[in-house]
Image: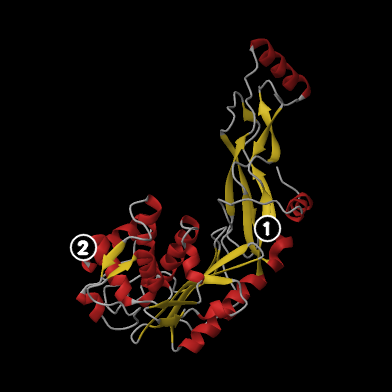
Amino acid sequence: MRVTLQNLIRCVGAGILGAALNALSVSAAPIETPAPFALLMDIRTGAVLFEKNADQPLQPASMSKIMTAFMVFERLKAGHLSLDHTFPVSEKAWRTGGSKMFLEVGKDARVEDLLRGVIVQSGNDASIVLAEGLAGSEEAFAEKMTQRAHQLGMKTSQFKNATGLPDPEHVMTARELALLVEHTITEFPDYYHYYSEISFTFNGIKQGNRNPLLYKNLGADGLKTGHTESAGYGLAASAERDGRRLVLVLHGLENDKKRAQEAERILEFGFREFENYALFKAGDVVENAEVWLGEAPTVPLIVPTDVVVTLPRAERRALKVAAVYAGPVPAPISKGTPIATLVVSTPATQTLEVPLVAGAEIDKLGLLGRLGATLDHLLWGQRM
């Protein structure tokens, strides 16, 4: 049984909204980048719009601090920590080189200030103070970061410190960074706003956010840059425009200018060339399936979740949708039972399959009803 393209286009034009649990995966995108590692993803549908070496290990540099902040956000959300809680500044934290928020050794610092020092100023000192305060040592905290990352599905990630300072065993992948960004945005809306702060002043020292996209009219509101001599220049970013949110990870570029140019160019590509199309809302009837020996001749096929697909704009009219089932479906049928599959595809995407469930309870005909249906089928070829 097929859903007509005309009906599908009407669904899209009606602007059906809702969070999608399924999305088409775009198989190819007409763009290149000099970045050795890259991934562009639509956060609503999970569709990957562009990727390059996305599963190869990379040294994430200060983008590691997204995980450091994530660990703190979890404690805050669970009520095990407060923004006003303070941690002492150790000599190790004070002496660590690289980017700093300029904490003073022996003094206490508030968690909120430390978070802003990590996120806005990329402070290595702030990262170490938080690590030591939460786990006793930076090494113990790094182990907890790795354990939590693996629980989130980031199986390649290994953390050896809270800062991202060079260590050959301290690695992530572009895909895992994108996944971490997604978790950060969706799980911590009360704290994500720190990533959009343009500057932060501590101890009379004002420092600007190193994320170049925040200073452009792109809809960007996070997250972190990263740079070491060995790894090059990278950025894990997110931007929202007209209700669509994209996540971008780039790494390994030769300088900060190229990082800014490539990030802006690829984000613009994602917003310009792709669109999200809402096909069905949870509970919509896609088709009515014929029933075998049931008290009703048909049963509605229902989508249990909203179905939204991310497509190249040029592919919209090539979209094909079909409700596939082995019919007629034998009674009895329990409401909510998967009995069919919604198949969505275009020439440029991988096929998406979504289970369709029975939208009604259909009892089996009694003995006389079955005999009558069988007779009708034998005499007239009617469906039973």
State left or right for residue 34 relative to residue 92.
Answer: right
**Amino acid identity at mark 1:** Tyr
Which residue is identified by label 1?
A: 277
Residue 59 location (% of width, % of height): 34, 76
Residue 289 location (% of width, % of height): 68, 34
Residue 353 drawn above or below residue 114: above
State left or right for residue 6 relative to residue 172.
Answer: right
Residue 262 location (% of width, % of height): 54, 82
- Which quadrant, please, contains the C terminus? top right
State left or right for residue 154 relative to residue 305.
Answer: left
49 or 150: nearer the eye? 150
Which residue is identified by label 2?
A: 136
Residue furthest to the top in view is 368
**Amino acid identity at mark 2:** Gly
Q: Nearer the viewer, mark 2 or mark 1?
A: 2
Judge the density around disc 1: few (<14), some (14-19), many (≥20) Cα neighbours within 10 Å.
many
Q: Measure how far apart labels 2 and 1 are at the Cα level.
A: 48 Å
Judge the density around disc 2: few (<14), some (14-19), many (≥20) Cα neighbours within 10 Å.
few
